[in-house]
Image (cartoon, coloured by chain):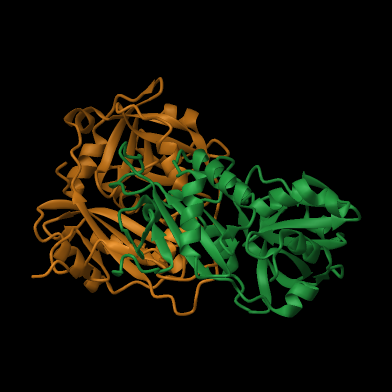
Chain colours: A green, B orange
Amino acid sequence: MNSLQKNSGILINGQFDANLPVMDRGLAYGDGVYRTFVVRQGTPLLWAMQYQKLLHDAQQLNLNICPAEQLLHEIQLLSADSVQCVIKVIITRGEGGRGYAIPANCMENRILVLSEYPQYAEHILEHGAKIFLCELRLSHQPKLAGIKHLNRLENVLARSECKLIEFQDGLLLDQNDNVVECTSGNIFARFGNQLITPKLHDCGVAGVVRDWIIQQSHQWSLETQESMLTLSQLEQADEVLMTNSVIGAMNISQLNNITWHHNTLAKQIRKALGISA
Amino acid sequence: MNSLQKNSGILINGQFDANLPVMDRGLAYGDGVYRTFVVRQGTPLLWAMQYQKLLHDAQQLNLNICPAEQLLHEIQLLSADSVQCVIKVIITRGEGGRGYAIPANCMENRILVLSEYPQYAEHILEHGAKIFLCELRLSHQPKLAGIKHLNRLENVLARSECKLIEFQDGLLLDQNDNVVECTSGNIFARFGNQLITPKLHDCGVAGVVRDWIIQQSHQWSLETQESMLTLSQLEQADEVLMTNSVIGAMNISQLNNITWHHNTLAKQIRKALGISA
């Protein structure tokens, strides 16, 4: 087994490797899309939905991706030694010269990166997380809204506003001061048996767990609606959740001086997703 | 001389190389800044301003860059065999794990890429270029406006709206339908002896040649003002220019059914910059 065949934790176009040509347009312009999800014993969380979402996002940028079977095979190859891990799949436009115009002969690069499943503190899983309110307001770009693309400087800047480790994440508003999402996941607010999650027509990332909760919420006797959500409405919620494809769902217990005391829905969602975090 | 010492046209942290670790946050999030400029016989166009702009943009994202002397040395090393070429300098956050939070031990990567100086058609240099009007509207993000960062999907999507080779570039408006820039350079409109270029507080990239023209316009008996500019105001201009650090300046002769017949200022600017394109 030579070094190229060893499991480096990274697969590039099906080969174990760890380096990408500098001329990849993923680096030059963030010209690509990605997904990050938990993989348990070779099975990605909500795999069919993950692939459909990756395909959808890729199509929005006119990127080609490999068939689901091939991608799943590579995920299983990469995660063969792990009971539970996180895999990130990146599809870039591929190598190109200078200039924004996409060369006719561009060939997408497919990158899979394995990482350990993160350790979440027990008290966060039990009682919910504290988050801060980001000062940065998400910009409106309908042509990119909802897509998990590689242009994520807004999230980087917003996340770096607060370095205190007691805050698990930051809440992002848009430029009209409406609630959009957390830096690393979507947000849901429960009012009685109504579950509200912000519309993502102008900004934000439409996550797979978000879609799944919208479809499945009836199993917890909830009705979900995508709607505008202000900060003062959020304050009135009975329960607030952050969702993504790694933790599944996490209750939010505190945002600045606002606290929410209900914290059972995230656990129910994690259980339904089979996430043991 | 081994392969690492050969001039691959790419320097990474001072070493000839062509590959970057996949875990670089430049790829993951577009977490970095860059500049592209013409280099003639080892001298970058407006070098002092280029370095100051790179430093400014890096500081906006809290990135460290090497001293000017070191960067210039690397530019000269890379361009040693070229009379005239284009060099792109990329500064990325460096390698990091998963998650938007910037790891404390992140070390910036410095990438220099050499490419040939492009061939501009004689009729464009003489009579100006045709451009199209992009449908995509630039989003407002004051925290990133003006910075040449690696999140350039808006430019990629806008440029790819029109694939006809007769169009040299696309004109970008913002979400209030004000003129901002072209996909690959800034824009100036001359009205008599007044030169107007859009304010870039909400979006757009503040280029070095733009800054230089603002400082130098008196030498062509012009007064420059940064101001709001609508499409119908642009239509009334005597002369319209696109500027960047590769071509310097290029007259625009046509946008859809609007034509501008004056086309002498770009040549004067190129001459003053010493660009022989």
Camera-nearest residue between B190 and A49: A49
Seen from the viewer's position, the closer of residues B180 and B139 is: B139
Where the N terminus of chain B falls, by quadrant?
bottom left
* Residue closest to the eye, B263 or A117: A117
Residue at image location 27% in from the left, 50% down from the top: B245
Query: Which of the 4 image quadrants contains residue B237?
Result: top left
Residue visible at 31% across and 67% down? B110
Looking at the image, the residue that sits furthest to the top is: B257
The location of residue B168, given as percent across then percent down, is 31, 33
For the image, the number of numbered tags is 0
Q: Is residue B187 above or below residue B162?
A: below
| Horizontal and vertical percent position of residue A49 | 63, 47
Residue B222: horizontal and vertical position, in percent? 32, 42
- Image height of B133 relative to B228, above or below: above
Left or right side of B236 for A141:
right
Does residue B241 appear left or right of residue A187 in this picture? left
Q: Quadrant of the C terminus of chain B?
A: top left
Q: Is residue B136 above or below residue A13?
A: above
Relative to B155, residue B90 above or below: below
Rendered location of residue A162, percent (x, y): 62, 73
Residue drawn 42% across the image and 35% down it: B171
Residue B27: in sight, yes or no? yes
The image quadrant that residue B72 belongs to is bottom left
> Which residue appears at 48% of the width and 54% of the height?
A73
The image quarter containing residue A3 is bottom left
- Furthest toward the front, the residue is A1
Confirm whether residue B32 shows in the render.
no
Farthest residue, direction right: A192
